[in-house]
């Protein structure tokens, strides 16, 4: 299950990515927003991130105008490592090296085709472990220490 969240600015791109998930047969839960009415992105990014943190969803995708607001919010939830990406290389490396469990995209930054490619490659990429596990452990230790 993939957790989804967006504000009004990210909604159109979220809907495009929902089509991609359907094409690929990937289950998702959309934590809102569901309308184009102006809203506050932290509300929806937090709901999606909490679903990833508590294990209801294995990964999460969040969307706003830039990806920055939802990405910052998701990273405030313990257990979440959210990459804010607008290119495929960073997205894949965020899985390979950082074991990111969430991805944030900016609907006003990336076009639909690029976003679909970024999400697809991110979903397919795995964590390499090894020396990267030690570094991820240090990230989580830093989170625990506040
Ligand atoms: C909304 O106008 C915009 O601020 C929001 O979508 C996001 O880009 C914030 O980081």
Image (cartoon, grey):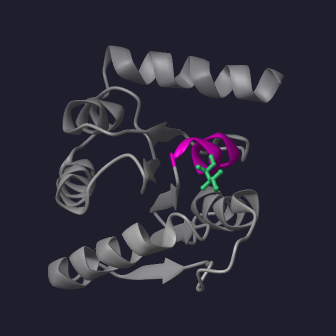
Task: Find residue 24 and report its image quarter.
Answer: bottom left
Q: Judge from the rendering whether residue 54 lies leftward or rightward of residue 118; answer left or right.
A: right
Q: Going 71% across and 44% down the picture, which residue do you hit?
A: 78
When the figure is inspected, residue 130 is found, relative to residue 71, above or below; the finding is: above
Does residue 68 belong to the magenta stretch? yes
Does residue 120 belong to the magenta stretch? no
Q: Going 44% across and 50% down the picture, which residue do you hit?
A: 106
When the figure is inspected, residue 96 is found, relative to residue 60, above or below; the finding is: above
Which segment is the magenta one?
A: 66-74
- In the rendered image, the quadrant that contains the N terminus is bottom left
Q: Main secondary structure of the magenta part?
A: helix
In this view, the residue in front, 18 or 81, is 18
- Count of numbered badges drawn on the protein: 0
Q: Going 57% across and 60% down the picture, which residue do you hit?
A: 52
* Residue 18 location (% of width, % of height): 34, 78
* Residue 11 location (% of width, % of height): 49, 73
- In the rendered image, the quadrant that contains the C terminus is top right
In this view, the residue in front, 34 or 53, is 34
When the figure is inspected, residue 19 is found, relative to residue 43, above or below; the finding is: below
Spot the residue most to the right: 146
* Residue 129 location (% of width, % of height): 31, 28
In this view, the residue in front, 77 or 107, is 107
- Residue 1 visible within the image: no
Q: Going 20% across and 52% down the picture, which residue do you hit?
A: 114
* Residue 104 location (% of width, % of height): 47, 49
When the figure is inspected, residue 144 is found, relative to residue 6, above or below; the finding is: above
Q: Judge from the rendering whether residue 43 lies leftward or rightward of residue 57; answer left or right.
A: right
- Residue 109 visible within the image: yes
Q: Judge from the rendering whether residue 136 lies leftward or rightward of residue 145; answer left or right.
A: left
């Amino acid at each position: 299950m993939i957790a989804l969240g967006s504000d009004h600015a990210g909604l159109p791109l979220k809907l495009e990515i929902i089509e991609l998930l359907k094409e690929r047969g990937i289950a998702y839960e959309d934590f809102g927003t569901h309308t184009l009415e102006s809203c506050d992105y932290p509300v929806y990014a937090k709901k999606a991130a909490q679903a990833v943190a508590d294990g209801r969803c294995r990964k999460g995708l969040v969307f706003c105008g830039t990806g920055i607001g939802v990405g910052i919010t998701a990273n405030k939830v313990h257990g979440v490592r959210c990459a804010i990406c607008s290119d495929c290389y960073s997205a894949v490396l965020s899985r390979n090296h950082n074991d990111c469990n969430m991805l944030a995209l900016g609907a006003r930054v990336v076009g639909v085709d690029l976003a679909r490619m970024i999400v697809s490659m991110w979903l397919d990429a795995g964590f390499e472990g090894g020396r990267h596990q030690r570094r991820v452990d240090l990230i989580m230790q830093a989170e625990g220490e506040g």
